Amino acid sequence: MTTLQQQKPGSMAPNASISRKLKEFYDAVQEEGIPDRFLDLLERLEEAENAQKARTKAVDAK
């Protein structure tokens, strides 16, 4: 007999309960906004990367 056949009718499989809880947690985290200071940090990182690329192009052009 398989595990699913051993369960009582109408009961959830143990993994289904875990999956449901994980999905609820993921959905809750996904709904949270990104903090402004994290967005600022990402913007500064992008600016630094662009500046580095510009310096590399300038050196390569010489």
Image: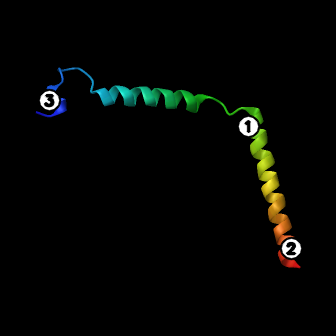
Name the quadrant of the C terminus.
bottom right
Query: Which comes sooner in the sequence, label 1 or label 3?
Result: 3
The quarter in which the N terminus is drawn is top left
Q: Earlier in the sequence, mark 2 or mark 1?
A: 1
The dot on residue 30 is none
In the rendered image, which residue does mark 2 sit on? 59
For disc 1, the marked residue is: 38
Residue 36 lies, with reference to residue 7, above or below; the image says below
Amino acid type, residue under disc 1 in the picture: Phe
**Helix, strand or loop at disc 1?**
helix
Colouring style: rainbow
Q: Assess disc 1: are there few (<14), some (14-19) or many (≥20) residues with their C-alpha within 10 Å of its C-alpha.
A: few
Q: Position of residue 55 (x, y in %)?
A: 86, 66
Give residue 38's quadrant in the image: top right
Residue 4, above or below 56: above
Measured as percent of width and height from the top left, residue 8 is found at: 17, 20
Q: Residue furthest left?
A: 1
Tell me what residue is drawn at x 86 percent, y 73 percent: 59
**Dot 3 or dot 2, earlier in sequence:** 3
Q: Position of residue 52 (x, y in %)?
A: 82, 61
Q: What's the distance in space between the residues labelled 1 and 3, CA to CA? A: 49 Å
Query: Residue 15's quadrant in the figure?
Result: top left
- Quarter of the rendering containing residue 61: bottom right
Which residue corresponds to the image point at 30% horizontal and 27% vertical from the top-left? 14
Amino acid type assigned to the residue bearing label 3 in the image:
Gln
What mark, if any, has residue 5 been given in the picture?
A: 3
Q: Are marks 3 and 2 in contact (CB under 8 Å)?
A: no
Mark 2 packing: few (<14 Cα in 10 Å), some, or many (20+)? few
Within-10-Å neighbours for mark 3: few <14, some 14–19, many 20+: few
Query: What residue is rendered at 50% in x and 32% in y?
Result: 26
16 lies left or right of 43: left
